[in-house]
Image (cartoon, rainbow, N blue to C red):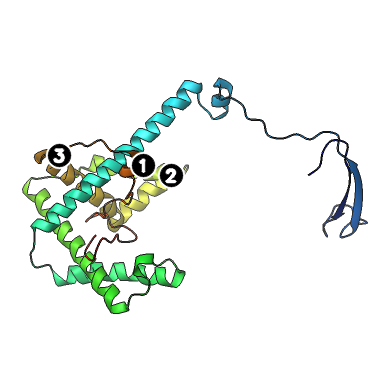
């Protein structure tokens, strides 16, 4: 570590494409003397610092942080409520599932598992298991997903829950904002692709059905620590909005 007053020799090699041809690729030694050593200085947050972040003042920074924390906690609380609801629905209903739907869901899951294997991203809980055991576990996950999907669809049908074009449009707008300058192309892409539109509509529909059911049942709020709230911070595997990787709990979780 250098200090003020030290004399150092710096050995360098000029780049091969250096602007001065006579120096390009050659080695050189520079004799230097350290006049002053400076380091980062910890400053107190103030309005000037807040303005560097693009906010009006320090109070605005605190407000933005508070809103961000509250939003994260609200999202996680809802995720836990949905998981509890899905667990209850799954436990209360047992009916024959359409084989083709189960097979299609399983194939989608298994393709992801095989991709994870090849990329070295296999879930630690799956390591060391035989392929037959893994397939049995993930088929149970596929069956649960199909069961929950059918249950949510039937609840929505019976109670005339629908997704409006306005709600779909708002969701697409949110997606389009991620591509500044290309918003119109994003809207056109969704308009021309029914499968992409269905992918937007399905999670909206699911959320509306979940909201409807949560209003009918008794929900008890419980105060818990942040550690407890985020002890299991994986979102519930939706029946309509598919996760990239299924979540497992025991042998038949979503």
Q: Is residue 183 visible?
A: yes
Mark 1 Cα shell of 10 Å, populated few (<14), some (14-19), many (≥20): few
Q: CA distance from mark 1 to mark 3?
A: 30 Å
Mark 2 Cα shell of 10 Å, populated few (<14), some (14-19), many (≥20): few
Q: In the image, is residue 17 above or below residue 63? A: below
Q: Position of residue 36 (x, y in %)?
A: 82, 33
Q: How many marks?
A: 3
Mark 3 Cα shell of 10 Å, populated few (<14), some (14-19), many (≥20): few
Q: In the image, is residue 1 above or below residue 36? A: below
Side (left or right) of 31 relative to 169 = right
User: Which secondary structure lies at badge 3?
Assistant: loop
User: Which secondary structure lies at badge 1?
Assistant: helix
Q: Is residue 123 visible?
A: no
Q: Nearer the viewer, residue 16 or 227?
A: 227
Q: CA distance from mark 2 to mark 3?
A: 35 Å
Q: Position of residue 254 (x, y in %)?
A: 24, 60
- Numbered disc in front, either 1 or 3: 3
- Residue occupied by mark 2: 178
Q: Position of residue 59 (x, y in %)?
A: 46, 21
Q: Position of residue 195 (x, y in %)?
A: 28, 58
Q: Nearer the viewer, residue 180 or 63?
A: 63
Side (left or right) of 93 relative to 197 = left
- Residue occupied by mark 3: 219
- Residue occupied by mark 1: 174
Q: Quadrant of residue 35?
A: top right
Q: In the image, is residue 44 above or below residue 170? A: above
Q: CA distance from mark 2 to mark 1?
A: 7 Å
- Whether the residues at callouts 2 and 1 have beta carbons within 8 Å, the answer is yes
Task: Residue at 39%, 34% (x, y): give it.
Answer: 68
Q: Nearer the viewer, residue 222 or 161?
A: 222
Name the N-terminal-most of marks 2 and 3: 2
């Amino acid at each position: 570590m250098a200090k003020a007053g030290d004399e150092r020799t710096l050995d360098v090699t000029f780049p091969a494409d250096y602007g001065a041809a006579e120096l390009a690729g050659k080695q050189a030694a520079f004799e230097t003397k350290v006049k002053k050593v400076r380091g980062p200085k910890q400053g107190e947050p103030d309005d000037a610092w807040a303005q560097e972040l693009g906010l009006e003042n320090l109070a605005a920074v605190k407000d933005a942080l508070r809103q961000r924390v509250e939003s994260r906690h609200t999202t996680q609380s809802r995720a836990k409520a949905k998981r509890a609801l899905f667990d209850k629905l799954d436990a209360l209903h047992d009916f024959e599932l359409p084989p083709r739907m189960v097979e299609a869901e399983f194939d989608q899951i298994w393709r992801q598992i095989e991709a994870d294997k090849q990329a070295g991203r296999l879930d630690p809980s799956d390591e060391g298991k035989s392929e037959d055991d893994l397939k049995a576990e993930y088929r149970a996950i596929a069956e649960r997903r199909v069961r929950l999907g059918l249950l949510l669809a039937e609840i929505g049908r019976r109670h005339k829950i629908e997704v409006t074009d306005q709600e779909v449009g708002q969701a697409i707008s949110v997606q389009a904002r991620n591509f500044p300058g290309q918003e119109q192309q994003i809207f056109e892409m969704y308009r021309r692709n029914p499968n992409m539109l269905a992918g937007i509509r399905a999670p909206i529909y699911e959320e509306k059905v979940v909201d409807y059911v949560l209003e009918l049942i008794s929900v008890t709020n419980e105060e818990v620590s942040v550690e407890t709230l985020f002890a299991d911070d994986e979102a519930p595997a939706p029946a309509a909005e598919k996760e990239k990787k299924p979540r497992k709990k025991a042998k038949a979780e979503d």
